[in-house]
Image (cartoon, helix red, strand yellow):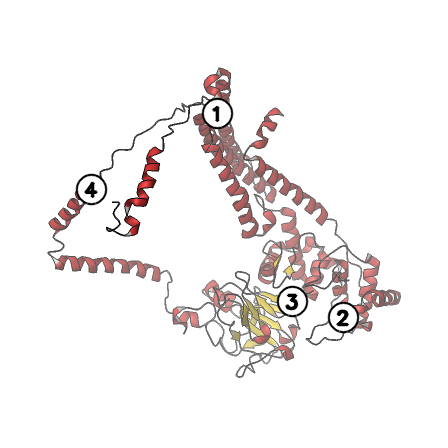
Amino acid sequence: MKALSQRRRHPLAAVALLLLGLLVTGGLYAVAGNVNEAKAQTTNFSAQDIEEGEKLFVANCATCHGIGAVGAPQGAHGNQAGPALIGVGAAAVDFQVGTGRMPMQMSGPQAQAKPNQFSEEQTMQLAAYVASLGAGPAIPEEDLLDVAKGDPAAGGEIFRVNCAMCHNASAAGGALTRGKFAPALAGVSEAHIYEAMATGPQNMPVFSDANISPEEKRDVIAFLKTIEEQGSPGGFSLGSLGPVSEGLLMWTAGLGIVIAFTIWLTQRSS
Amino acid sequence: MGDHSHGSPSTSGTVATAGQSDVEKFQDPGLPPHRPRRADKDPRAEKRAERQVAILFVISIIGTVLFFVGYFGIRLDDTIATLRFQNFTLGMGTAFAMLGIGVGIVHWAKTLMPDHEIVEERHEVRTEEDRRDAEQIIGQVLDESGISRRPLIRNTLIGAGVLAILPAIGIFRDLSKDMNPEVLRHTMWDAGVRLTRDPSGTPIKASDVTIGSAFHVIPEGLNEAEHKLEEKAKAVVLLMRLNPDELNVSPGREDWNYNGIVAYSKICTHVGCPVALYEQHTHHLLCPCHQSTFDLTQECKVIFGPAAHALPQLPISVDDEGYLVATSDFHEPVGPSYWERG
């Protein structure tokens, strides 16, 4: 213990602390990410679900999306509080409400994920109501979300061609224009990944079944879950953000160590 | 020197003289008194420092052993966990092996090696004499070589020196196997070439492309092409559909889109990164490398960033079976500018 306390002013102590902090944050994040594992409900909605969903919609969503989900009237510059939801399908509702993005907390460049405002049942009822307004992408079947049936290698190729430019090759997310961003995909449930591809939430383009087939979507999910589970092959990934986080570490911790060694080298011994 | 009638005011000696007399008063403080270190006075401290240096060297030895344990001892299996563990041991082993020696040697020098100060006097400066010697040597070289008397030799030497640089230009020029700039002007796209999905190569029906969709597209037959990657680097295309009312089509491009389906080159006109970050509501295309932003509704005009000109548009139509086809190659070279682009 004495040796440890003697080394608390050692030049490497700050680095050791930083690395420890990174490990703890990463570990907590991994634990928190695994909590959100909601499973998709079946797509057969009863008339009562639709009725309950309409009540919820009128009370919580109609302010922006209009009564009957026809959308808010357009402003002078073509801006609109909330778009029409006819034909967006149950998948869009399950994604937007299930990830907490809707109802939106405030206007901004993009709706952000936050703790769910509705229970799983209420989300399902809202989805039932919106799905009853017009045909759209349905909540995916369990079979299409079964990672064990997907091919991670094929999914990786599809991911790199279609998704990696925004979401980063290791799915760590990235910046878009004017405050918008593509979120990191670790910890997102299989159903929500599928629904995002099928419906194109916010500014994400739609990757319909005609573009990426349901089986290929399952491959993509299998790839994402594989890289999430296996982690990095070595070293600290630093959020897999590339030159920004790596450069920051080298310019602060790396140069800090060099400066500390320089001071030590030129200091007289006691 | 004190006379102001000679020389400029700045070289007149009156002001400088006062300064010089000040400098002359300045006393050389000499070296600070030598302060013995703890290891110099206390034999126990000396012993401790010796042990510390030895421990640092032992840490280095342990680091090297750790490297070999990791290198030969860890069997890699199908999981990435063993690879991660091996990388960890190799990195830590090498770090300790190097740091242990380095820190140990410095610690040794600082605590145990003699630290008395040594003064080495600077040798006398002999400016004028040295300059005369140098001038004499140069003059002798010029004279003996006869470079001023023999202009033929001088001029041919200059000519040879200039020409000797040219092979380097030739070598760098040939880094590209085919320097014909025409290869940059044309891609695999041609009238009737189907648009197919990247990477599967399956053709795309116009009805598959719903509003808000983005397809990453390669020309039909690219996967079988001889120089697949070279061709792909020029021919990749991003296919998007938006409401036809939102497109501002310039004269001459009226039949380049098909019911709001447009195809643009994915190669940034700045330095050639793939521009594929499509925002389906703002209709902006963002290049991830330098944030060049292109507005899809204005035929991919540059609205932000360093790119110099708009992304080239691929004219498209549909064939008898309803598949999307190109109606010609790009009408301008894709990608960054180059000398012969015009």
Q: Where in the figure is residue B91, as x and y percent of width and height? A: 52, 38
**In the displayed structure image, the side of residue A180 where residue A256 appears, left or right:** left
Residue designated by label 3: A205
Q: Are marks 3 and 1 on the same chain?
A: no
Residue at 20% from the left image edge and 60% from the top image edge: B159
Density class for disc 1 (Cα within 10 Å; few <14, some 14-19, many ≥20) is many
The x and y percentages for residue A24 are: 66, 41
Q: Which residue is mark 4?
A: B128
Mark sitting earlier along the chain (3/2): 2
Tag 1 residue = B53
- Give the secondary structure at mark 3: loop
- Compute the Cα span from label 3 to label 1: 62 Å
Q: CA distance from mark 1 to mark 2?
A: 73 Å
Chain to which the residue tagged by mark 3 belongs: A
- Closest to the camera, between mark 4 and mark 1, is 4
- Residue linked to disc 2: A85
* Residue at the limit of the structure toward the right, as seen here: A48
- Residue A78 lies, with reference to residue B139, above or below; the image says below
